[in-house]
Image: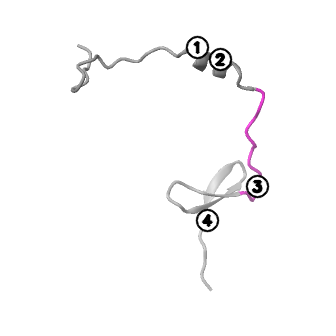
């Protein structure tokens, strides 16, 4: 049994993409590549902690005070 919207009573189903969606999807330049990180690059992880990129992996860092 399909799920129903409690207010409208409509069935909750996924609809196909619109013509505008198809047009915009086709306009994407798929040749663009993401930048590959280089050794020493830094970022904040999902916990807000600093990480550095070394040897092909993101590594957590510790900061010493003083």
* Image quadrant where one finds the N terminus: top left
The image shows residue 48, relative to residue 58, as above or below, that is below
Q: Are marks 2 and 1 in contact (CB under 8 Å)?
A: yes
Distance between mark 4 and mark 2 Cα atoms: 44 Å
Per the image, the residue denoted by label 4 is 61
Per the image, the residue denoted by label 3 is 39
Q: Viewed as shown, does residue 22 lie left or right of 3?
A: right
What segment carries the magenta color? 31-41
Residue 28 at x, y percent in the picture: 70, 25
Element on which disc 3 rests:
loop
Residue at 27% x, 17% y: name it. 10
- Taking depth in this image into account, of 61 and 30 the one nearest to the observer is 30
Mark 2 surroundings: few (<14), some (14-19) or many (≥20) residues within 10 A: few
Magenta region includes residue 10:
no
Residue 18 at x, y percent in the picture: 54, 15
Q: Are marks 3 and 2 in contact (CB under 8 Å)?
A: no
The image shows residue 40, relative to residue 16, as above or below, that is below
Q: Are marks 4 and 2 in contact (CB under 8 Å)?
A: no
Q: Which mark sits nearer the N-terminus, 3 or 1?
A: 1
Distance between mark 1 and mark 4 Cα atoms: 48 Å
Label placed on residue 19: 1
Distance between mark 3 and mark 1 Cα atoms: 43 Å
Q: Which mark sits nearer the N-terminus, 4 or 2?
A: 2
């Amino acid at each position: 049994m399909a799920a129903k919207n409690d207010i409208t009573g409509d069935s909750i189903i996924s609809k196909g993409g619109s013509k505008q969606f198809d047009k915009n999807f086709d306009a994407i330049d798929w040749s663009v590549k993401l930048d590959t990180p280089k050794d020493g690059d830094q970022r904040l992880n999902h916990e807000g902690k600093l990480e550095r990129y070394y040897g092909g992996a993101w590594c957590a860092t510790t900061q010493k005070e003083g």
